[in-house]
Amino acid sequence: MSGSVSMAQPLILRRQIELKINKKENKMEQGKINVQTENIFPIIKKFLYSDHEIFLRELISNAVDATQKLKTLTTTGKYSGELGDLTIQVKSDPKKKTITVSDRGVGMTEDEVKNYINEIAFSSAEEFVKKFKTKSEAEQNALIGHFGLGFYSSFMVADKVEIFTKTYKKGGKTKAVHWECDGSPNYTMEETDKEDRGTTIVVHLDKESKDFAEEHKVLELLKKYSKFLPVPIQFGMEKVTEEIEGEKDKDGKPKTKEVEKPRIINNTDPLWKKQPSECKDEDYKNFYRELYPYSFEEPMFQIHLNVDYPFNLTGILYFPKIKKNIEVQKNKIQLYSNQVFVTDSVEGIVPEFLTLLHGVIDSPDIPLNVSRSYLQSDAAVKKISNYITRKVADKLEENFKKDRESFEKKWDDIKVFIEYGMITEPKFQERAEKFVLLKNTEGKYFTFEEYKTKVKENQKDKNKNIVYLYANDLESQYSYIEAAKERGYDVLNMDGILDNHFINAVEQKLDGVTFKRVDADTVEKLIEKEEKAPAKLDDKQKESLKPVFERNIDKNKFSVMFEDLSEKDMPAVITQNEFMRRMKDMQQMGGNAFMGDMPEQYNMVVNANHPIINNILEEKEEKNQDEMVKQVYDLALLSQNLLKGQALNDFIRRSVDIIK
């Protein structure tokens, strides 16, 4: 850590600091910072309680800042000394309950420690506390990051913190300094014998936080927060297997040996920091495996983000194959700020549908240590979000135009993502209308315009509306699909998990177009024409048959109605009102119990022109009528996969009796 650490923020209110200094023979300085606000440290311990592990990220980020500053001083000619090994060292000691972070960066002089540790940080801390006490919990979280609390976040987990630091500067007051504080406004500072430049922070963990000193926990936090920091970070040693050059075993395979090497946590040059022109497909695949080592599927394609105006943004976003469960796909984007991990929960930061993507977004314009609610309202974050949405649409449109055949092959895997975007993001919907596809039951793909051209003549009803017929289960709705095809109609395959919502969304955009599921009504009613089929039964005969059917069906679930259909159609079909079914399906998906818990309601449509129906009418024996109606009813249920349990067993027995 150094004078350039992130906690050195501009002061909002400067206050008086009175130092009561007693100099002893060993030149130890004892001081007390008489802050006006009491109990700063208890609040510091609490304010990031849900993320108390953040202290390690802050300390390492400060070490990286100090190291990077020394590199800059060297590049600009302001430091001509030897840089040497700049690896940041992290050590833990479970017995002593300590974590130590050491860098070889710029270090600090005694005056800089007084300025950056004793004054600026505490002043910022006090101002933070004043504002903190008057805010709600959400507002408290939003204040994080606006004050110089990077270093002092270590007091969330510590009962004592030590600093050993030596500046890179020569001459004057440049001796090494040891600073110590026990979590109260009291501190001690003295000269020390540290020879090498840089800063070492020793965190003495309190009882509640002692687990942070365990090796597995430190390793977990380092991999989470520091995996891609630009300065090497070492945490102990590890054993690795290496090939022995020039030596082979009896099978001709290279001999290996086990060697101990420094355990370097991070990749200092991640792929997203490179120019897209420098990266090959294999590089992107390898980086995806680095991000998601437990994922066994490769992504379909990716977008490499690289922009420096009007904001800085780099990153790589991958398009995974979307499974049936959307929730499983979320929280896979990792958000970074200057290669420092911020969060992997980006809902509300990027549009909802983009959370289905995988990969990395990195921008120094994204503030650290702030709540998600703050990020959601941040102007820079909004600009970045809009930019990413536009780039995603650009990439999809480019792929569609460049290689439509390949795009169609990938359609089933990216369909959910595109539909999700069109449902939830109006700006994306406008762009996606150019490349979103409709797939019919024969496996052919069409854009909106192409499909409208295909069906507009044949599937126009008497009100001049174009009707798009669709099925969501090709097997159970097979008979309905075939009935539609016999009329020369085309049927779309809409079996996706979002298709109910998607249909509602696009229906509002497509002028003069309506969607109807093939089992929502009889074919004649789905697309009503001017001409009607002749009726073989008059209204009086239909009324006399109605109670015959009603006494043999479940009247709580089914309503009987008669239609004059073709003789070739089934004697009866089961249909379900399109509007009511859609409402019920959507409310079930949304968790709304009002309609979602309502019992299913169906229509039993009796084909008044079918010979069997005429036979039932002419049958004088009630028992025989009932047997015939039950058989017709069960056949209709069977076609909708609604015949189950005892009813199915009775149908089978009855069918066997008929063919004996």
Image: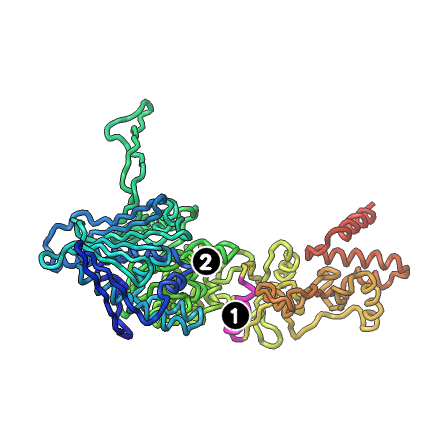
Tell me the magenta residue range: 498-511
Residue 3 seen anywhere in this rendered image of the structure: no
Q: Mark 2 — residue?
A: 330
Left or right: where 86 falls relative to 350: left
Whether 555 is drawn above or below 13: the answer is: above
Residue 38 on image: x %, y %:
36, 68
- Check disc 2 and give the amino acid type: Lys
Residue sitting at 29 percent across and 58 percent down?
A: 181
Whether 648 is drawn above or below 619: the answer is: above
- Check disc 1 and give the amino acid type: Ala
Residue 153 on image: x %, y %:
34, 60
Residue 142 on image: x %, y %:
39, 69
Residue sitting at 54 percent across and 67 percent down?
A: 503
Q: Mark 1 — residue?
A: 505
Q: Badge 1 local density, few (<14 within 10 Å), some, or many (20+)?
A: some
Is 492 contained in the magenta span? no
Q: Badge 2 local density, few (<14 within 10 Å), some, or many (20+)?
A: some
Please tell me which residue lies in front, 201 or 27.
Answer: 27
User: Which quarter of the figure has residue 127?
Assistant: bottom left
Viewport quadrant of the N terminus: bottom left
Mostly what secondary structure, the magenta segment? helix
Is 510 contained in the magenta span? yes
Left or right: where 124 falls relative to 505: left
